[in-house]
Amino acid sequence: MECVFLKKLENSVVFCIASMEIILIVLRKNLKDMQILYNNALVRLETTLHVICSAQF
């Protein structure tokens, strides 16, 4: 009885770890995409500020 419980517990832990690894992979991909979007936004902001400053002087 105890052995069956331990086996189920082990399977649950393995499943949980696998799920967490998949979540981390997805998060890492999303973070990379967010970094690209953030960098693009910074470049646009920089360009816009440059244009505004150039127009004033």
Image (tube, helix red, strand yellow):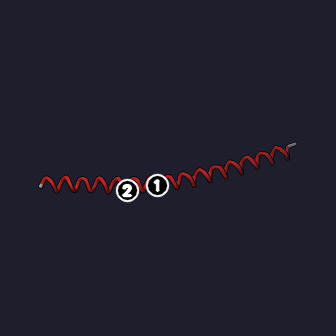
Q: Position of residue 35 (x, y in %)?
A: 43, 55
Q: Residue at x 57, y 52 (%)?
A: 24
Q: Is residue 35 left or right of residue 1?
A: left
Q: Residues within 10 Å of mark 1 (few under 14, many from 20)?
A: few
State the residue at coordinates (76%, 49%).
Answer: 11
Q: In the drawing, does residue 51 fall left or right of residue 36?
A: left
Q: Circle 1 — which element?
A: helix
How crowded is the residue under tag 2: few (<14 C-alpha within 10 Å), some, or many (20+)? few
In the image, farthest residue toward the right: 1
Disc 2 is placed on an element classified as helix
Circle 2/circle 1 CB separation < 8 Å: no
56 left or right of 21 in image:
left
Which residue is disc 1 drawn over?
A: 33
Report x, y in % for residue 49.
Answer: 23, 53
Quarter of the rendering occupied by the N terminus: top right
Q: Position of residue 3 (x, y in %)?
A: 85, 47
Q: Nearer the viewer, residue 13 or 30?
A: 30
User: How far apart are labels 2 and 1 at the CA level?
Assistant: 10 Å
Q: Residue at 33% x, 54% y: name it.
A: 42
Q: Residue at x 15, y 54 (%)?
A: 55
Which of the marked residues, 2 or 1, is nearer the chain's N terminus?
Answer: 1
Please give the count of numbered marks on the rendered protein: 2
Is 27 positioned to the left or the right of 41 in the image?
Answer: right
Disc number placed over residue 15 in the picture, else none = none
Q: Which residue is mark 2?
A: 39
Residue at the left extreme? 57
Q: Which image quadrant: the C terminus?
A: bottom left
Question: Which residue is more in the foreground, 34 or 6?
Answer: 34
Give the amino acid type for the residue marked by disc 2 in the picture: Asn
Tell me the amino acid under the disc marked 1.
Answer: Asp
